Image: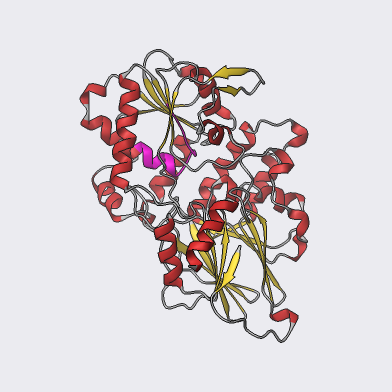
Amino acid sequence: MSYKRKAEMPVGDINDLMEVTPLGAGSEVGRSCHVLKYKGKTVLLDCGIHPGQSGISGLPFFDEVDPATIDVLLITHFHLDHAAGLPYFTERTSFKGRVFMTHPTKAIFKWLLSDYVKVSNVGANDMLYDETQLAACYDKIETVDYHQEMNVDGIKFTGYNAGHVLGAAMFLIEIAGIKILYTGDYSREEDRHLMAAEKPTNVQTDVLICESTYGVQSHEPRIDRERRFTSTVHDIVQRGGRCLLPVFALGQAQELLLMLDEYWAAHPELESIPVYYASSLAKKCMTVYQTYINMMNSKIRKQFAVSNPFVFKHISHLKNMDMFDDTGPCVMMASPGMLQNGLSRELFERWCTDKKNGLLITGYCVENTLAKDVMNEPDEIQTMNGTKLKLRMSVDYISFSAHVDYTQNSAFIDEVKAPYLILVHGETNAMGRLKSALMS
């Protein structure tokens, strides 16, 4: 969805037209992938999958583009809806271009996608790629630092810190003197471990391609959200229930772990109630978090100088369910964040019929996922094997998804002052409302 802010420039030649084609996330959240063409150069921005679909149907619409024509592919961050289509694209299409992402994104990408291959609930024939293809893709990825200007055959680009998750970048791309800023997913709020997104300075952007996830919604102040989060968790365990927190394995999870560890330390009466982080990725990726502490905010860097904030005193890692004694109250953080499959889904099905238990959704939920359906509190849910279960556990939604709200997004758009704005990464209604608000 796009609009322009000033009179149309006269176009002398068809080559002077810039084409931006969303292959995914044009009017949805999921499978972010956008083709940018100008002056004979082609850039692909992100290459994700749709969390609400499986197999081939979850990919971007790659048949709209000739992969062989793409010169450069830029991945903004490691989330599956921005990066999990990449091995398919590099290994199973005619793409021969170069792929770039930041160092932390590459480090986490490897573990995250290896886990995705293992837990994908599809048969061998529907697998998008296997471990061998993932490894081949990984070897093709080149890394960039924030503020490092690259030039690939006349396509210049620079990554800037986008907040959101560790290593997330927005990319400023320049082709033949025209500058395009692609935000990817970004957050303008400093949280417990990440800096807020930065705006490229001393740059006149011509085209801004910007996320619109939350449309015209406003976030509750962070301090109130944290208070509501910890008190909801406390209430669930106090009534003898199991509190399930479905999370993205990385990013949002680290933020919630920091909160819970601090809260448990301040409430000795909770000491006997275990908090689990169930993820085979947790340990591996914590080493990445510790490696890139210098890319986080000053608060956590100061803390790190004294002791490692990512070594949690009150949280136990669970590698698999064999080690889990499911008796009595507990807090369980498990992936994936939208209950599509995997451990969070298994535990949800196990616990959903008991009204003592509680589900606390802390991230954005995409259409056609179980988490989105459950937010409407239906009487029953369908299990993975097709049977029906009563939904009796409490359901709460408190978002820590690290996307801009309307106030933050509109302020950033105003600061960038690009004559042309293209909105992506939002459901049609949210995007339409945002467009109307920005034009009024």
* Front residue of 67 and 270: 270
Residue 94 visible somewhere in the drawing: no
> x, y percentage for residue 145?
47, 63
Front-lying residue, 111 or 37: 37
Q: Measuring 49% from the left and 39% from the top, which residue is drawn there?
A: 248
Can residue 205 be seen here? The reply is: yes
The residue drawn where x is 30% and y is 49% is: 300
Q: Residue at x 74, y 58 (%)?
A: 95
Give how far across and how far down residue 341 sits, in percent: 59, 30
Stretch of the chain drawn in magenta: 244-257
User: Residue 271, percent across and down?
Assistant: 26, 22
Could you say which quadrant of the image residue 386 lies in?
top right
Task: Tell whether 406 sits left or right of 7.
Answer: left
**Location of residue 335 in the rendering, given as x and y in whole percent from the top left corner:** 51, 33
Choose top left, top right, bottom left or bottom right for residue 405: bottom left
Rendered position, 428 above or below 36: above
Residue 29 vertical placement versus 200 (above, below)? above
Quarter holding the N terminus?
bottom right
Colour approach in the figure: secondary structure
* Residue, far front: 440
Please state the total of marks drawn on the protein image: 0
Residue 186: say if magenta: no
Is 187 in front, or is 292?
A: 187
Vertical side of 114 occupied by 320: above or below = above
Q: Which residue is farthest top?
A: 327
